[in-house]
Image: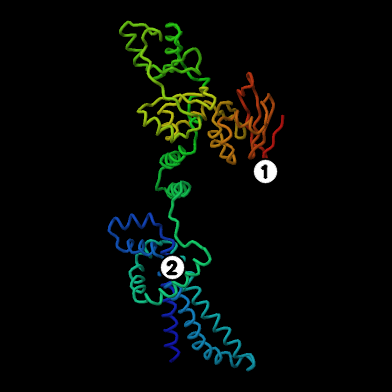
Amino acid sequence: MGFTQQILLIVLLVGISAFFSVSEISVAASRKSRLAVLAESGDEGAARVLALQARPGPFFTLVQIGLNGVAIMGGIVGEGAFSPWLTEFLGPMLPEAYLDSVAFTLSFVLVTSLFILFADLMPKRLSMASPERLASAIAGPMILLIRWLQPLLWLYNGAADLLFRLLGVPTARNDTVTPDEIIAVVEAGAQAGVLAEQEHAMIENVFGLEVRSAPSAMTLRESVVFFTLEESEESIRQKITSRPFNRFPVCDGSIDHVVGYVDAKDLLNRVLAGQSLSMKADAPINPLLALPDSLTLSEVLERLREARDDFAVIINEYALVVGVITLNDIIRALVGDDVEQVQEEQILRRDDNSWLVDGATAAADLMRVLDIDDGGGSEHYETVAGFMMYHLRKIPRRTDRVDFAGYRFEVLDVDNHRIDQLLVSRLDGATGEISGEG
């Protein structure tokens, strides 16, 4: 075989190796969701790639046979093509004792470099850039080769499966998509400009409903406006005038003894009809849904849907009312309005490095504003006051402080063991470790 023919054969082997490299990376890197969309739109190549991904054993066996076989042949042909030429070229410059060794080494380096550059690096980087398009293009030829070489592939693939079973290694691909993976895809879409910032935030909030607890979005006990069965009509009128809500809980003496709720529209109809607003005077009291405070917002939404209602009272493990929640509260958590409201009403920014925070602020909202991770401690508390009690391990007093994740949380005001206000300051050169002082 002449030198020119050997060079052409090497080029052909490099091309074959590049084809297998493109096949391997493009099929492995292709996103199943993207392929499914293309297949539904009539792309036969995408459907073939999905078939290869469903049964990857024969495909990757063929790829490895091709890559290894071509590499061995490339080394044999390359050494035979370049060594004589390099020996002749270097003959006048090197002693004869070293000539063959140097020529062989240079031939090996030259052939290896050709395969690394043109059959490995460039094809694989190209495949990573557009895996679905390239995988769709090579799927047909690869399926044809798999059919032709079925006995050989069955032999190698069967041997590999047998070894995996003996070693107890699972080979089934896990295609389960987690919420974190979906959020990562959404963030990538937002960075690429495919999703608007509002859409990005809303999708993240949808998954946030699964982890946020009911108390993080409810109206706290201290802010609930309720009527008692013994309450005077004048007092009821004053409450409606000062706090014009749509629903008002009705209690027997205290807020912990809820008997139902009244709708503001029903009260208006009674006023227009000249009837008394007193809860004793045959008031239209409706049953009120009671939910435990351990539920997530997603679970609360499901319970409201099942009850066909949009208002519920939240009760803790001691049967005490901790707040009320409405469908609008969950919608605000979904669209993000609650965060803006918290920032305006409960988290007041003093300057670039400090904030005044209401003790009743949901801890998750403050952590989101400060962009810090509470390390999974949120399961032990709901509010910033609970955060302080958890880390201090005592009832907080004025000037007590906690250093956490690069911030200092200092108690400014306490009312009957209840934290009214904190000062949150950014620490310089903080390590993010937790420390408490009292």
Q: Residue at x 55, y 82 (%)?
A: 108
Residues at marks 2 and 1, CA–CA distance in whole angstroms:
44 Å
Query: Callout 1: helix, strand or loop?
Result: loop
Quadrant of res 288? top left
Mark 1 closeness class: few <14, some 14–19, many ≥20 residues within 10 Å: few
> From the viewer's perspective, is residue 77 above or below residue 164?
below
Query: Callout 2: helix, strand or loop?
Result: helix
Towards the viewer: 199 or 148: 148
Quadrant of res 298? top left
Q: Is 45 on the left or on the right of 438, as rendered? A: left
Q: Where's residue 202, x and y in %?
A: 42, 39
Residue furthest toward the right?
A: 438
> From the viewer's perspective, is residue 86 above or below residue 12?
below
| Mark toward the start of the polypeptide (2 vs 1) | 2
Towards the viewer: 117 or 133: 133
Q: Are marks 2 and 1 in contact (CB under 8 Å)?
A: no
Q: Residue at x 57, y 83 (%)?
A: 106
Quadrant (top left/top right/bottom left/bottom right) for the N terminus: bottom left
Residue 431's disc is 1
Towards the viewer: 76 or 190: 76
Q: Is 32 on the left or on the right of 219, as rendered? A: left
Q: Where's residue 294, x and y in %?
A: 50, 32
Residue type highlighted by circle 1: Thr
Residue furthest toward the left?
A: 42
Towards the viewer: 121 or 218: 218
Residue 247's disc is none
How many numbered discs?
2
Residue type highlighted by circle 2: Glu
Q: Which residue is under mark 2?
A: 24
